[in-house]
Amino acid sequence: MMTCIVLDIDDTLYLERDYVRSGFRAVDRWVAGAIGVSGFFDRAWKAFETGSRGDIFNRCLAGTGVDAPGVIEQMVGIYRSHAPDITLLPDARRFLDRVSGGRLAVITDGPLASQRAKADALNLRAWADPIVFTAEHGPGFGKPSPRSFQLVADRLKAQENECCYIADNPAKDFQGPKSLGWRTIRIRRRGGLHAERAGTSDIDLEIESLDSLFPAGRSLVIATASHA
Ligand SMILES: [Mg+2]
């Protein structure tokens, strides 16, 4: 019986693009006030929407005449520490409410300040314990390492055949839990940043909505939706 459900956060429980948009707004307010640069948000969002990743802040400052050392660092700090305007997707909210009371945990990679702010904004502590921020545990602990998954299984006193990880990124999310014998479910959301990636052999089941795990009139089907 599947009794231990572990969830990713970004693009699993809410859309990461909403976090990006919220972060750009926070940075926009700062650059407008602190260094007098206007229009940051529109430029940054356009860059994101057209596929830029990783160098958007630099690109958006280029041509503004701002060349103060440390400005980019401050922008990154504001982006990561801002209180994000994000909400649980409706199916995620329904899912959490339906499985509430059982063993439910979260494992998330990413900068600690950002991931904590997201967990707070989504009020995940109301449903999940533990919430494992892999960044808190030092190098080598993040996905695809199985270490965070083993930590959760130990904390919840769960056997491997009771555990399931639900996440969105085939590049790193499923290798660790699968190596421990967990079931793995990929949620492939419209608008998800990794939605276009091809699936991998360590994924047992792919769904587009968490509602699929609760077919009408039936209880959670994670345990019976076997690939075998
Ligand atoms: Mg994710």
Image: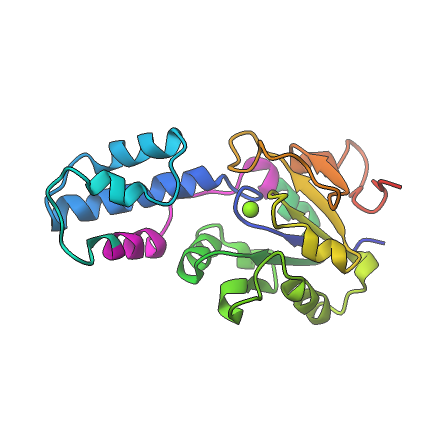
Query: Could you say where residue 135 lies in the image, as x and y percent from the top left?
Result: 49, 64
Q: Quadrant of residue 197?
A: top right
Q: Is residue 99 above or below residue 56?
A: below
Quadrant for the C terminus in the image: top right
Residue 78 belongs to the span the image colors magenta: yes
Query: Could you say where residue 122 lies in the image, as x and y percent from the top left?
Result: 48, 50
- The residue lying at 67 percent from left, 47 percent from top is 166
21 left or right of 71 in image: right
Residue 63 belongs to the span the image colors magenta: no
Q: In this picture, which residue range is highlighted in magenta?
A: 73-93
What is the chief secondary structure element of the magenta stretch?
Answer: helix
88 left or right of 61 in image: right
The answer to whether residue 4 of the structure is visible from this angle is no
41 left or right of 191 in image: left
- The residue lying at 33 percent from left, 33 percent from top is 47
Q: How is the image coloured?
A: rainbow
Quadrant for the N terminus in the image: bottom right
Q: Quadrant of residue 226?
A: top right
- The residue lying at 80 percent from left, 61 percent from top is 160
123 left or right of 26 in image: right
Return the residue nearer the eye: 16 or 139. Answer: 139
Q: Is residue 198 above or below residue 84?
A: above
Name of the residue lying farthest toward the right: 228
Return the residue nearer the eye: 157 or 50. Answer: 50
The answer to whether residue 214 of the structure is visible from this angle is yes
Return the residue nearer the eye: 166 or 60. Answer: 60
Query: Could you say where residue 196 lies in the image, as x and y percent from the top left?
Result: 58, 31
> Number of marks in the image?
0
- The residue lying at 77 percent from left, 55 percent from top is 182
Query: Could you say where residue 170 lies in the image, as x and y percent from the top left?
Result: 63, 43
